[in-house]
Each structure stands twice: as C-alpha cells, then as structure tokens.
Image (cartoon, rainbow, N blue to C red):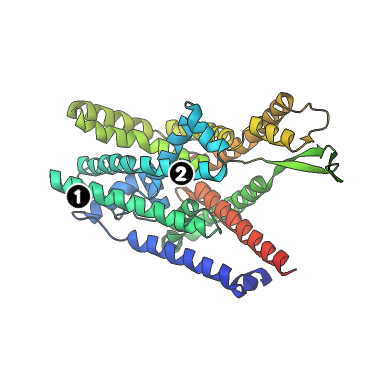
C-alpha cells in the first residue's frame, strides 16, 4: 500500500502512469471503430466456431470480432520480429547489428522490423478479408473497397506499434505486451457476466475447478518467472596505477524462463499464418485456394493435432528466443574482458560451453512449463468437456507475467529515486 501511495506522490512517475493509461484508452477506443460492410450476427457466429481466431480475438481486445481498424492488433509486428530474429541466424551482418552495436544496434534492428511490418500487415489484412468473404461473413468487395480496407487495417496496426513504442518509452513496462494485456483484461467483464448468467448450482464443481486451476497457474507463473540459477563469478585482482581492482565475487543469474511470454505469442502468430496463406493463395488459383483452405481447416479443427503443434511450437520458440537473447559466447567474452571467471572453468571457450549447457538444461523446464500452460485449456476441454477454460491458461500467463514485469520496472524507478535522495 505504501508503494502505491509513493508512486502517486512522485510527479514524474505519476505522469508516466497516466500517459500509459491514456495510450491504452486510445487503443481501446480504436478497437470499436469498425470497417464498413459487416454483418455482426454472422461475424459472432464465425468467431465462436473458430477456436484459433476466437483465441486471437481475446488478444486484440475484441477488435478482431468487431472488424475494427486495429483488428490485427500487433500481430504483424510480432511476425516481423520473428522473421528478423530468424534472419540473424542467416546473415552475420544482421547478427552483428543486434548483438555488437549496443543500444544503437537494437534501435536499428527494431526500425527494420517496423519496415517489415508494413507489407506483412497488408498481406495479413488481405488474407483475413478474403477469409471472411469466403465464409459469407462480409459481402464481396470491389478492388477499390479491398485496397481501401487493406490500407486502413495496415495503418491501424502501425498506429498500435507506435502506441506500443510510446508506452515503452515511459519505462514502466513493454508497450507491445501491455497492449496485449489491455486486450485480455478488457474481455474480463464479459467473461464474468457470462459466468454469472450461465451459473448452475449443479455444476458448482466446474467453477471451483476453474478457481483452483487459476490459482495454480498464477502460482506456477510467479514461481517459474522468478526462478533462476545463480552462477558464482569471481574477479581477479588487478592493479591500475595506485589502485587495486577486482578480488570480489558476484553471481550471474540465469532465469528458468528467459523468454517470458514471447514464445506463446510467436506460436500463435505461426498458427495463424497457414489460414492467412490459404486466403492469399486465391491470387494464384481459386481451385488451389479452396483445396488448401479445406486442408488447413481440417487440420486445425482437429483438437489433438492443434494441441500437439501448439505445444511443439511453444517449446521450439522458447529455446529459439532464449538463444537469441542469451548468447553464451558474448557473455563469456564480457566476463573475460572484466576479469571475471567461473571457479573451476577456464575463461573463454570453456566458459561458453559451460554456460550453454546450463542454460539448455534450465530452459527445458521453462519450455515444458510454457507448453503445458498453453495447451492446458485444450487438455481440460478434451478430458472433461468443459469449455470455460478455453483460454484461461495462456491469458493468465500473459497477464501475470506483464504485471510482474511492470512491477519490477516501477520498483526499480522507486529505488533509483530513493538512492538519489540519499
């Protein structure tokens, strides 16, 4: 309670929170501005019958189901980020920009990701509009109307990316994650209202099960997010001029879940890609597009296939994102430059191999946890037939992770101000 009061007593921090709240309200306002020519009843029916799109709709805060100008949310930017990070493994120059040029290199990398977001947003919006037309959710569009809607939707996605960057500049949380967080939270009133309306005393165990699972997921997320392996680091004594440096010990914290919620977001983006590709393929051939679309729908409507692919993608992206953000060779070089070493391990290549083995082992637990959380609702529905937990696991995971990250950033600013006052 004292922390909360302290936050609002500090003018600079209070202003940052108000700016973030205003920007998130702008996102919510944009999410209810629809594009023309929408049949609401058909749209709601279509989203209720399509699990993956219904899932994505949660993260867009209902913007997708409303066919708003920001219906794609930040999905194109996330897809662009995935592609750029994959390219770092192919092009050494791009990898050097990301790892070796510091903050300036990261800024350049993000700028390239934004450039790539524009064509991806255009392709995704075109594919999604074609998907809705093929399902008779919206009427057939002419060339002018198609180009207009694609431009509007693409512009909406870029506006959200810009809002996300403005939020990140306030240093109280990641902007993209907070936009997704706001989208999830905005759906809570409808979920609660639906639970109250459909309340049945004879299935009280269902509500109790939901509550227990939610508590366990929250506890598990906090435990995994805060879990870390501390590698002891010693620093050799060095004499420079008349002063002696080093001779102290510290530790290198290796988090169990280095990747956070990014693997799940990446996995969702990849799962959406085949559906958009099937619609975009109409440019090549109508017959091919129909067959491709039928195949995609058959595969993704199979719960067992969908669950297995989802779990595998989360596992793969957990390792992939950890490899991108944590490079043992770079850590080893930095330790060696600073005169640090791990007891019993030679500096240089041996240290790099040792750190690689450790991070690989602890990431396995983080990857399995994220994968299980992601497919927990699917497993529950397949085993019990309960539809209430369809999105519970992943939504709770993202909400709790974003809240923890924002709390840490706010707390670090409070500590910094306390230090400055001393």
Please give the name of the residue rendered at 77% of the width and 36% of the height, measured from the top-left corner: 339
Nearer mark to the viewer, of 2 and 1: 2
Residue 414: percent from left, percent from top = 66, 64
Task: Give the quarter of the image for residue 244.
Answer: top right
Please give the name of the residue rendered at 58% of the width and 50% of the height, measured from the top-left corner: 213
Disc marking residue 148: 1
Residue 107: percent from left, percent from top = 49, 45
Circle 1: element type = helix
Q: Earlier in the sequence, mark 2 or mark 1?
A: 2
Q: Which residue is mark 2?
A: 110
Please give the name of the residue rendered at 55% of the width and 58% of the height, measured from the top-left corner: 171
Task: Give the quarter of the image for residue 336.
Answer: top right
Residue 47: percent from left, percent from top = 32, 48
Residue 50: percent from left, percent from top = 34, 43
Please give the name of the residue rendered at 22% of the width and 47% of the height, measured from the top-left corner: 137
Q: Is residue 317 above or below residue 173?
A: above
Q: CA distance from mark 2 to mark 1?
A: 27 Å
Give the left or right position of residue 287, taking residue 20 as reference: left
């Amino acid at each position: 309670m004292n922390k909360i009061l302290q936050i609002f007593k500090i003018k600079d921090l209070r202003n940052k929170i108000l700016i973030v709240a205003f920007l998130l309200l702008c996102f919510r306002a944009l999410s209810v501005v629809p594009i023309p020519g929408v049949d609401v009843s058909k749209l709601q029916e279509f989203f209720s019958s399509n699990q993956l799109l219904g899932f994505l709709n949660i993260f867009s805060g209902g913007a997708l189901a409303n066919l708003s100008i920001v219906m794609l949310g930040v999905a194109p930017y996330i897809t662009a980020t995935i592609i750029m990070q994959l390219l770092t493994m192919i092009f050494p120059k791009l990898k050097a920009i990301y790892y070796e040029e510091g903050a300036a290199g990261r800024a350049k990398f993000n700028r390239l990701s934004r450039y790539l977001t524009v064509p991806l947003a255009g392709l995704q919006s075109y594919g999604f509009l074609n998907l809705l037309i093929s399902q008779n959710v919206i009427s057939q569009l002419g060339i002018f109307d198609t180009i207009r809607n694609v431009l509007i939707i693409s512009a909406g996605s870029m506006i959200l990316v810009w809002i996300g960057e403005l939020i990140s500049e306030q240093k109280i949380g990641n902007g993209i994650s907070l936009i997704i967080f706001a989208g999830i939270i905005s759906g809570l009133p409808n979920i609660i209202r639906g639970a109250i309306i459909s309340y049945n005393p004879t299935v009280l165990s269902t509500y109790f099960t939901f509550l227990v699972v939610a508590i366990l997921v929250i506890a598990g997320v906090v435990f995994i997010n805060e879990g870390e392996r501390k590698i002891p680091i010693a620093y050799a004594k060095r004499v420079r001029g008349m002063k002696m440096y080093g001779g102290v010990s510290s530790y290198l914290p290796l988090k169990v879940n280095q990747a956070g919620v990014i693997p799940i977001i990446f996995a969702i983006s990849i799962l959406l890609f085949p559906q958009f590709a099937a619609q975009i393929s109409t440019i090549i051939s109508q017959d091919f597009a129909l067959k491709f679309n039928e195949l995609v729908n058959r595969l993704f409507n199979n719960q067992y296939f969908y669950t297995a692919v989802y779990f595998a993608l989360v596992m793969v992206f957990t390792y992939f994102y950890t490899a991108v953000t944590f490079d043992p060779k770079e850590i080893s070089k930095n330790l060696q430059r600073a005169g640090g070493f791990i007891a019993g391990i030679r500096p240089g290549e041996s240290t790099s191999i040792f750190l690689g083995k450790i991070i690989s082992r602890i990431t396995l637990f983080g990857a399995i946890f994220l994968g299980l959380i992601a497919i927990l609702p699917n497993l529950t529905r397949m085993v019990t037939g309960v539809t209430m937990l369809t999105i519970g696991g992943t939504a709770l995971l993202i909400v709790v992770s974003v809240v923890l990250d924002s709390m840490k950033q706010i707390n670090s600013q409070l500590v910094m101000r306390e230090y400055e006052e001393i």
